[in-house]
Amino acid sequence: MDVKVRYEIEFPINSSPQLLYQYISTPSGLSEWFADDVNSRGEFFTFIWNDSEEKARLASKKSGEKVKFKWVDAAGKDTDYFFELHILVDELTKDVSLMVVDFAEEEELEEASQLWENQISDLKHLLGSV
């Protein structure tokens, strides 16, 4: 398996941080834009896309600010990879943006970024932030 590289993308979003946080931190919110379905049992979340399923552990969260999901292997053990969704609010303008931190293999960086662009576009439609 190739080593994955970390990357960050920032998306401006017209939304209150409180509303945005509901969409990035809850199974029901995430299932509206991130995956076809999201289930949680305790700190473990199952993300379902078409016929594939990935499990992650809610590694950390700061209410109203950020969530970090660490991918787990078939045995339920943490892997080296995670994704983080961080709400940023500009102190002066109060502009809100969502910082995405994720990992992808070097040759798949552009494709992975495009996938996030599409998913965040869905999120913006839900929030009325288009």
Image (cartoon, helix red, strand yellow):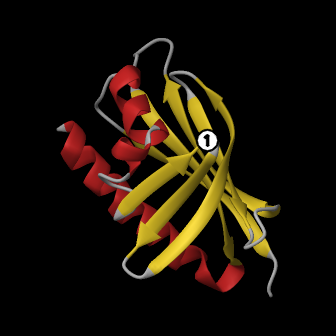
Is 49 in front, or is 13? 49
Question: Would residue 91 be found to the left or right of residue 107 on screen?
Answer: left
Q: Quadrant of the N terminus?
A: bottom right
Asked where in the image residue 29 lies, by quadrant, the reply is top left
The residue that appears at 60% across and 81% down in the rendered structure is 108
Crowding at dot 1, Cα within 10 Å, few <14 / some 14-19 / many 20+, comes out as few
In percent of width and height, residue 128 lies at 17, 38
Query: Count of labels shown?
Result: 1
Q: Is residue 129 visible?
A: no
Whole-percent x and y of residue 86? 56, 36
Farthest residue, direction top: 92
Q: Compared with residue 111, is residue 68 higher up or lower down, i.e. above or below?
A: above
Q: Amino acid at mark 1?
A: Gly
* Local secondary structure at mark 1: loop
**Outermost residue toward the front?**
41
Task: Work out whether 61 lies above or below 42.
Answer: above
Which residue is at a point 29% across and 55% down the rendered structure image?
121
Tell me, yes or no, if residue 100 can be seen here: yes
Please tell me whether residue 10 is drawn above or below residue 61 in the rendered image: below
Image quadrant holding the C terminus, namely: top left
Name the residue rendered at 33%, 26% in the picture.
Answer: 19
Task: Give above or below for 67 relative to 71.
Answer: above
* Residue 93: percent from left, percent from top: 40, 16
Residue 68 is drawn in which quadrant?
top right
Residue found 27% across the figure and 55% down from its top: 122
Q: Which residue is mark 1?
A: 42
